Amino acid sequence: MISFSEFLNYLAYLLPALIAGGIGYYFFKTYVDHQKEMQYLALRKENRSEVLPLRLQAFERLVLFLERISPGQLLSRVKPVGDNKYDYENLLIASIEQEFEHNLVQQVYVSQKCWDAVKASKNSTISLIRHTNMSDKITNAQKLREVILTDLLEKSSPSDTGIAYVKNEIKQLF
């Protein structure tokens, strides 16, 4: 059996080795972690230079989408085929939905809040068209166009709110 004094002698030899090993491990681990972080930052910088143009293009496409579904732009681009106000309402909504489906992939490049703002603008525009068409004053497609355009003179369109949000998101990038 080992006596207490022999144990202290072994410990005296072992303790400096353990301390040197611990310090060596600490420095090696710190060095490896630093190298990983540097590689991560380099990869992130490389990705940022590739992804930033794609994100900017997505923002551009979303602003274009919101401009195209803005009631003023939409009504000037989509003319009524007949005199039926319900057919014209459906045509306008179908046009908005088609534009939206064409731009669905842009959500990959923007934040969830930004995408939600774009969807809310789209849904508000559809709601505005439907709500206006429910009025008893609306008798035909031409009257529907006139009332929507007149309402836009008094207040801003839902697209304006969406565009403001997208622009704010772009500002946050820089």
Image (cartoon, grey):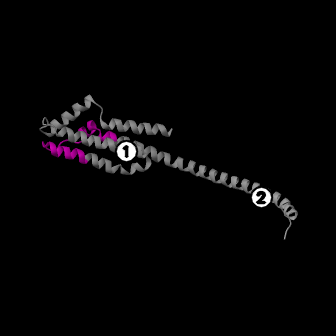
Verify whether residue 73 appears in magenta. Answer: yes
Residue 105, compared with residue 60, is above or below; it is below
Q: Quadrant of residue 19?
A: bottom right
Disc 1 marks which amino acid? Asp
The location of residue 85, given as percent across then percent down, is 15, 42
Residue at the spot x=48%, y=38% of the render?
A: 172
Front-lying residue, 66 or 19: 19
* Tag 2: amino acid: Gly
Magenta-tinted stretch: 66-94
- Please name whichever residue, 101 or 125, is drawn nearer the observer in this view of the structure: 125
Q: Which mark is residue 127?
A: none
Callout 1 secondary element: helix
Q: Considering the numbered disc 2 on the image, is that residue within a helix, a strand or a loop?
A: helix
Classify mark 1: residues with Cα within 10 Å, few (<14), some (14-19) or many (20+).
Answer: some
Camera-side residue of 164 and 65: 164
Magenta span includes 148 = no
In the image, taking residue 5 as reference, residue 128 lies left or right, namely: left
Is 70 left, or right, of 138 in this rendering?
right
Q: Quadrant of the N terminus?
A: bottom right
Q: Disc 1 to disc 2, how far (Cα)?
A: 55 Å
Q: Nearer the viewer, mark 1 or mark 2?
A: 2
Q: Where is residue 17? Give x, y as percent.
A: 81, 59
Tag on residue 116?
A: 1
